[in-house]
Amino acid sequence: MAFRIYTKTGDKGKTALIGGTKVPKSDLRIDAYGTVDELNSYIGLVSDYLEDKATIALLREIQDRLFTIGASLACDPEKDTKMHIPDLLPADVTLLENNIDKMNDILPEMKAFILPGGHVAVSTCHVARCVCRRAERLCVGLQEQNQFIDPLVLQYMNRLSDYLFVLSRWIGHQLNVPEIAWKPRK
């Protein structure tokens, strides 16, 4: 028989962190890594709209880092999990920064706030950016509740949202889609 995906152990609203600690599914830590998982799905969707192989490869690498972050968040910080969780590295943040700079070098100067839209790939990238910001806020919430979170996770999530914003502009530029400037009502 094939592996069953359902265990029925969560039917009463509880789940286990890596390390075995049972917590409610509404726990902030569960919300944080669930939102990182949601972000990962949106990044997969963004890559499905693209043809640039280098950008798709970088998005796959970002998805890998998000699995690392999710695993880190899923661990009970009070227990030794006896599992090897991959590390997030400062070089991962640098990779995002370098790619932001590379894209910015070819983009026109931004002279107004930009509204999401113009092409489904651009809009989806903006959705991913917003989900990334929500994941970042949840991680900050863990920190504010004195729950352990690797400071590099916060830095990576912050830089990733910047990357996704610039990527949305770059995608539009590559597709010759004009940016939609916000023109506030006067």
Image: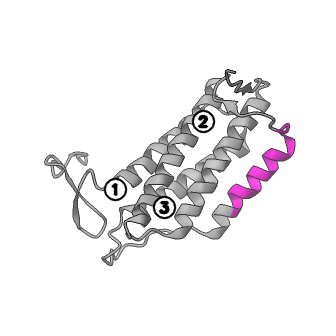
* Earlier-in-chain disc, 2 versus 1: 1
Magenta: predominant secondary structure element? Answer: helix
Q: Is residue 24 left or right of residue 123?
A: left
Amino acid, disc 1: Leu
In the foreground, 99 or 116: 116
Callout 1: helix, strand or loop?
helix
Q: Along the horizontal axis of the image, is 150 left or right of 3?
A: right
Image quarter for residue 141?
bottom left
Going by the numbered disc 2, the residue's amino acid type is: His
Q: Which residue is mark 1?
A: 28
Q: Is residue 87 visible?
A: no
Q: Nearer the viewer, residue 114 or 60?
A: 114
The quarter holding residue 85 reads bottom left
Residue 76, relative to residue 168: is it above or below? below
Question: How many neighbours does mark 2 have within 10 angstroms: few (below 14), some (14-19), or many (20 or more)?
Answer: many
**Residue at the far front in the pictured view:** 186
User: Does the magenta-highlighted stretch encompass residue 12?
Assistant: no
Residue 102 falls inside the magenta stretch: yes
Cα separation, mark 3 vs mark 1, equals 18 Å
Residue type for callout 3: Thr
Secondary structure of residue under mark 3 = helix
Quarter of the picture holding the C terminus: top right
Residue 52 or 24: which is nearer the viewer? 24
Query: In the rendered structure, which disc, 3 or 1, sits on the residue that comes first in sequence?
Result: 1
Q: Which residues are magenta?
A: 94-109
The residue pinned by badge 3 equals 68
Colour mode?
one colour
The disc, 3 or 2, on the residue closer to the chain's N-terminal end is 3
Give the labeled residue for mark 2: 126
Question: How far is disc 2 from disc 1 in space, using C-alphas?
Answer: 24 Å
